[in-house]
Structure formats: structure tokens, C-alpha cells
Image (tube, rainbow, N blue to C red):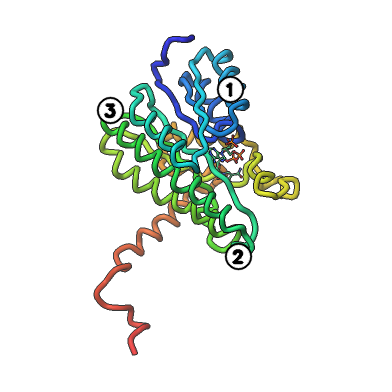
Amino acid sequence: MAMPSSKGTAVVTGASSGIGAVYAQRLAERGYDLLLVARDQARLNALAGQLAQQCGINSEVLVADLTQAEDLLRVEQRLSSDPAITLLVNNAGMAVAGDFLDNDIDRVQTMITLNVLAPTRLAHAAGNAFKARGKGTVINIASVLALVHEMANGVYNGTKSFVLNFSRSLETSLKPHGVRVQAVLPGLTRTEIFERSGISADGLPAENVMDVETMVDAALAGLDLGEIVTIPSLEKLENWQAYDDARAALLPDLSRRESASRYHR
Ligand SMILES: NC(=O)c1ccc[n+]([C@@H]2O[C@H](COP(=O)([O-])OP(=O)(O)OC[C@H]3O[C@@H](n4cnc5c(N)ncnc54)[C@H](OP(=O)(O)O)[C@@H]3O)[C@@H](O)[C@H]2O)c1
């Protein structure tokens, strides 16, 4: 076993495949010890063993189904009680494809639980622990679909809009306490999420799909740059700024005693 890392331990949810597995790899390369969370114990064990050997770090596996209250609580308790933990990547997530009205509503509920409830509770546990220690980082994986209202599955998009909103508000409350929060908004990224949600990734236009390593490397570069919101494929950062400025310009007029004049009869 290696000495505990001076960087501390990174907790990565959904580390058994895709974006989470690459975060685990890159964070191990940066010298973090790892606590890898997901349901598939065999895959987690294989990755944890490989990264410990390759990078000389300590790695541990915590098998948890984050849609199950007791499992989620075990991860929360670890985040609250382990002072070695310095970074949380709230990455585990799923998609349900197709039109909402055609979806299996129980599967939709599972998606809301995994994509919204789990990162919220984990960020609450980690956020309070990091605040008490005056340092730490929470990375929340949202999606560019957080910004898309009219296409794809509205509930999936809505869960990711939640993650974006929530991350920005959490960032405001934790920044004065020395804690970083970053929301990452990947576009289409080549992972298992498509097959898992019943879509073939083969049909997606190649020029719109990023390799998972490219996505995670950009997201970590965004973290290093101090970004609060990172959109890996967006070249024209000024367009995001203009969008955000337009949103901010709405704020003073969104709640007033009088209704707008077009509604006066
Ligand atoms: N790929 C994209 O195009 C894309 C774009 C934007 C955002 N995202 C977001 O990126 C994140 C990672 O997705 P991915 O693309 O890497 O997909 P992925 O390869 O399917 O990985 C999903 C991960 O979440 C874990 N997971 C699923 N259900 C879980 C549960 N109930 N409890 C605990 N862990 C669970 C899976 O592990 P187990 O099966 O072992 O539990 C797996 O490790 C998600 O939040 C997704 O919404 C993806």
C-alpha cells in the first residue's frame, strides 16, 4: 500500500465506465488516492487495482446503487466522516431516450433519483465537510442538454438543468469558504450511455461526438483555469458569456408588483 496522497482522496461516482472511469484514471495520474463508486464490483475492482499499480496510489471500491437510499447513505456517511477526501466527482448518471409520454415512468423516476437526488445528497455531505475544512472541490457532471429545451428527452435535459443551476448556487455559497465547485457540460461523448438507454451511438454524426478522454482532459483543464461552468466543445466562449449576461439582464424584471403592460386590459 502506498503512503496516503498529499492531494487527498477523490471520490468518483459512476467510475466503472465511460466518463467516470477516465476521471479516475486522470485523477490517479495527478496523484489522488481514489474511492470508486458504482454498482459493478468486478469492473470497479479491476480499475482500482490497475490504477493503484500504474500510478502508485491507494484505491478503494465502494459498491453502491445510488438509487437505493441505504447505499446512498453509506456514500454520504463516508464523505462526511473521512477527512482524507478532498474531491468529489458527481458523475453517475443515466439517460432515458425517446418521447416522455412513451417512456416507462418508473424508469424516468429512477433517472431523476440517480441524476438529481443522488448528486444533491452527496454534494450536501461533501460540501459541509469541505466547508468545515476550508478546502475541497466538487465537480458535477451536467450536460449541454441543460441548455436545450426543445429536443431530446425533456426529463433528462431537466435533470441536467438542475445540476447546472444547483452547481452555480452551491459555488456561490462555498466559494467564500475556499471550496471549488465546477459544473461540466459535455456534449455527445462516446460512452456506454447510449447503449444503456437503448440508442446506438453508431448512428450519431461523428463530427458531433467527442472521445471520452478528450472530454475529461478538457474538463480538467477547465478546472485548472478556474472555470465554474465548463463546456468542452464550445470554442466561442463569448457566446456563453452573452447567454449568461442576457439571463442576468432579465433578473431585475422577473418579480414586480405590477404585471407587464401587454397584460393590461
Ligand atoms: N456520454 C454522453 O454523451 C454524456 C453527455 C453529457 C453528460 N453525460 C453524463 O455523464 C455522466 C457519465 O455518463 P457516461 O456517458 O460516462 O455513461 P456510462 O458509461 O453509462 O457510465 C455511467 C456510470 O454511472 C454508473 N451508474 C449507473 N447507474 C448507477 C446507479 N444506480 N448507482 C450507481 N452508479 C450507477 C455506471 O456504473 P454501474 O453500471 O457499474 O453502476 C457507470 O459507471 C452521466 O451523468 C451522464 O448523464 C454523458
Res. 217 visible in picture: no
Q: Residues within 10 Å of mark 3 (few under 14, many from 20)?
A: some
Q: Earlier in the sequence, mark 2 or mark 1?
A: 1
Q: CA distance from mark 2 to mark 1?
A: 39 Å
Q: Is 247 rendered above or below residue 144?
A: below
Check disc 3 and report its element: helix, strand or loop. helix
* Residue for point 32% across, 34% down: 179
Residue 178 location, quadrant = top left
Q: CA distance from mark 3 to mark 1?
A: 30 Å
* Residue for point 31% across, 29% down: 135
Q: Measured from the top left, where is residue 114 in percent x and y?
A: 50, 45
Q: Which residue is mark 3?
A: 133
Amino acid type indicated by mark 1: Asn
Q: Is 165 rendered above or below residue 127?
A: below
Amino acid type indicated by mark 3: Arg
Closer to us: 157 or 92: 92
Closer to us: 207 or 138: 138
Q: Is 132 rendered above or below residue 231?
A: above
Q: Is residue 264 left or right of residue 204?
A: left
Disc number at residue 45? 1
In terms of image quarters, where does ligand 1 lie?
Answer: top right
